[in-house]
Image (cartoon, rainbow, N blue to C red):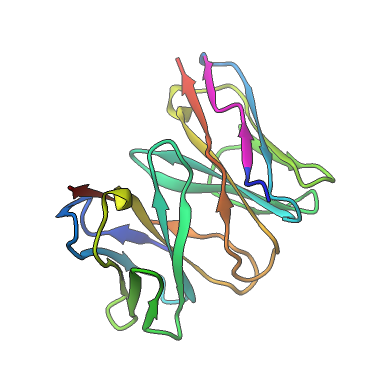
């Protein structure tokens, strides 16, 4: 089955810096990946997704990069703000048939003002 | 449009008891999924329901069960609670069932088993 994991459990950055959160996956059959943000006391919130036929996708202040060769994706947050402090999860899955995403453990992003 | 709601938000039970958690999806969403979140295991898929039928099931023992009603509201039940069942139980709804659909998560129910 799918295995998705994160390289670093905690990332500390200064306000205004760019943040990069990494994720590795094992299942080559995954055809989409999602990044979620989870703030304390809340459920995960969708940030951005990317299909496996893409290598980059940009959103508002966020960019996701997908490297299928090494089965790696990253989430880049530009000009990180204190409100970005949260746990970030990557999830992968296959869209054919059922939808059972597999989540990484999460990276805690701490933004220092 | 109201988000996914879960009740209760917090629950304390003792070993051997059973518990029922409730989830109301976003209006119009027909798929409801349940997840268990723990510090050690992260987010793990429990099951997914659509049109009152369980469509997918994760790798959890039979003590974990669920159901979905005709209005798409869903409940999950855990019988014979164990200490290891202490976790945040998250419900997520999505509008469709096949393929990739964005999931919208509720705030979760924090279950503590003593």
- Residue A6 location, x and y as percent? 28, 58
- Residue B96 location, x and y as percent? 70, 64
Q: Which residues are magenta?
A: B5-13
Tell me if A43 is positioned left or right of A66 in this view.
right
Occupied quadrant, residue A60 = bottom left
Q: What residue do we see at 43% from left, 36% from top?
A: A41
Tell me if residue A43 comes above or below residue B79 in the rendering.
below
Q: Main secondary structure of the magenta part?
A: strand
Tell me if B33 is positioned left or right of B71 in this view.
left
- Residue B107 location, x and y as percent? 53, 39
The verdict on residue B6 being magenta is yes
Asked whether A80 or A52 is in front, the reply is A80
Tell me if residue A67 comes above or below residue B63 in the rendering.
below
Q: What residue do we see at 47% from left, 22% from top?
A: B112
Tell me if A43 is positioned left or right of A109 in this view.
right
Q: What residue do we see at 80% from left, 48% from top?
A: B52
Asked whether A109 or A7 is in front, the reply is A109
Occupied quadrant, residue A7 = bottom left
How many marks overall? 0
Asked whether A23 or B14 is in front, the reply is A23
């Amino acid at each position: 089955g799918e295995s998705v994991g994160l390289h670093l459990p905690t990332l500390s950055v200064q306000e205004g810096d760019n943040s990069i959160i990494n994720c590795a996956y094992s299942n080559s059959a995954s055809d989409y990946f999602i990044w979620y943000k989870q703030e304390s006391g809340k459920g995960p919130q969708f940030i951005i997704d990317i299909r496996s036929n893409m290598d980059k996708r940009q959103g508002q202040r966020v960019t996701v990069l997908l490297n299928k060769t090494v089965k790696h994706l990253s989430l880049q947050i530009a000009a990180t703000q204190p409100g970005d402090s949260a746990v970030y999860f990557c999830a992968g899955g296959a869209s054919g048939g059922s939808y059972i995403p597999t989540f990484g453990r999460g990276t805690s992003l701490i933004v220092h003002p | 449009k109201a988000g996914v709601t879960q009740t209760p938000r917090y629950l304390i039970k003792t070993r051997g008891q059973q518990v029922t958690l409730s989830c109301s999806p976003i209006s119009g969403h027909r798929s409801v999924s349940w997840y268990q979140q723990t510090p050690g295991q992260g987010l793990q898929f429990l099951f997914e329901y659509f049109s009152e039928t369980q469509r997918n099931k994760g790798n959890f023992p039979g003590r974990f069960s669920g159901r979905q009603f005709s209005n798409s509201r869903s409940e999950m039940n855990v019988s014979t609670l164990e200490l290891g069942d202490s976790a945040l139980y998250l419900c997520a709804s999505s509008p469709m069932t096949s393929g990739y659909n964005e999931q919208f998560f509720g705030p979760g129910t924090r279950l503590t088993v003593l």
